[in-house]
Amino acid sequence: MEAVAAWLALWAKTRALGWLARHWPKLVAAVLMVGGTAAFLAVTAVSLASSAGQGASAANACTELGYTVDQAAYHPPPVDQAPTTPAEGPVPGFGPGDTDKIANAQAIVAAGGVAGVGRRGLIVAIATALQESGLRNLDDGDRDSLGLFQQRPSQGWGTAEQVRDPRFAALAFFGGSTSPHFNPESGRASPGGLLEVPGWMDLPITVAAQSVQRSAFPGAYAKHEARATVIVDALGRGTSATAAPLPAGTGEQSAVVTAADYRTSGVDIDAFCSSTFQLASAAGPGSAPAGQLIPAGEWTAPLRARVTSPFGNRFHPVFHEWRLHAGTDFHAAVGTPIAAPTVGFVGAVSWSSGGGLTVTLTHAGGVETQHLHLSEALVKPGDEVQGGQVIALSGGSGVGTGPHYHYEVHVDGGPVDAEPFMLQRGVNLRAWP
């Protein structure tokens, strides 16, 4: 029996040595590949996390790429009881430094008063100019398009100098008897303006504007309606357009190391993030994850996470009294990306002792959304945002029992329950248990 066992051992050894003799090059290559990859990832991870500051920068870059990081890894910029927030512009709907845009909007409002188009006509015109030029008096554009409304001299809108005159361009856009292109014999302006569009006051903005502009992107005007409405109402009630000085202490935030910076330096930040954090899009099914843009007019969940406290009266966990909880709370670690639920613009970035760092978005139809308890705002007042765009990172600022995200919806100035509101728009906020 011992002889048989010894023969079997010798046979197995001979076979093994033979296999190694035939395959040793492949085996060495595989070991080197695995070892090299492990070493690279280890060096990358060590270099990224060799200090608290570098680890925070790496985690911040991962949130930029759409990964959800935990509170231990993410270190938001230091905030005091009242952190510096981006300055608002001197007129609602504008940011600081928008003096030229405000002057152009004033010229449109003044021309609308001459043309007699009323508030609706002014909103259509401002929304059109926002889409065509960003309310800037451009000296270039597609083919020979120029000015606020990107009107083309070759199509009869006037000379290059004329269409770059805000008053001339606005009166031409409005049309009617005050248009520089009005023909008394026909009783119409040619090219025709808004007043030449039958029933324009009852048409959606995108249809009314497109009837004048003949744009290659006819659906683009609608996303500017909310901001245009705020601008018209602000300028219409005589809000001063003189640029206000920036509050003391405001200015550019300190430089942030981005994912692109890591890639430029030769660091595989994508590999580090994927091996360290969870991609936000893996959190569950349903609407688009933060960072994935959606078409104008559609809605998405600002955060795909479990609801921890619904809208309604409740016994406050901190103040120990019954009061209205005007929003919906979600489970969220500090640093989780928060998305704009639909197209709109940033009405304010503010701080309060209760809500902490807050981003307020204005949307069409008298709808406003508020995003509370943030650790960092990634937008500033006056910015236009698209649905799904990351606007902030969640946190634990303000009053609360711990880090979480609070989402409020206001309609015509009053808070409403976000869950049925969003469900009517095809988004189930309870989809992620």
Image: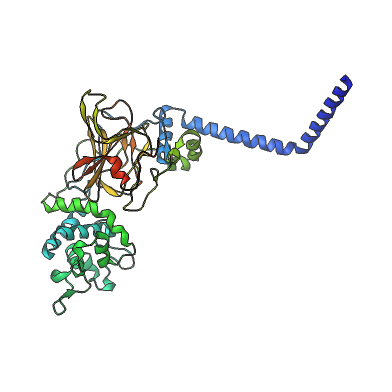
Query: Looking at the picture, how far across and down is residue 47, in whole percent?
Result: 49, 31
Query: Looking at the picture, how far across and down is residue 350, in whole percent?
Result: 23, 37
Residue 139: name its quadrant: bottom left
Q: Is residue 169 visible?
A: no
Q: How is the image coloured?
A: rainbow
Q: Is residue 35 left or right of residue 299?
A: right
| Quadrant (top left, top right, bottom left, bottom right) of the C terminus | top left
Query: Looking at the picture, how far across and down is residue 325, in whole percent?
Result: 24, 32
Nearest the eye: 254 or 376: 376
Q: Is residue 271 left or right of residue 238?
A: right
Q: Is residue 153 visible?
A: yes
| Quadrant (top left, top right, bottom left, bottom right) of the N terminus | top right
Query: Which residue sits at x=21%, y=27%?
Result: 322
Nearest the eye: 26 or 431: 431
Nearest the eye: 429 or 8: 429
Query: Which residue sits at x=11%, y=51%?
Result: 237
Query: Which residue sits at x=20%, y=65%?
Result: 200
Q: Residue furthest bottom?
A: 185
Residue 199: name its quadrant: bottom left
Q: Residue furthest top?
A: 2
Query: Which residue sits at x=23%, y=22%?
Result: 320
Query: Looking at the picture, how far across and down is residue 421, in whole percent?
Result: 28, 44
Q: How many marks?
A: 0
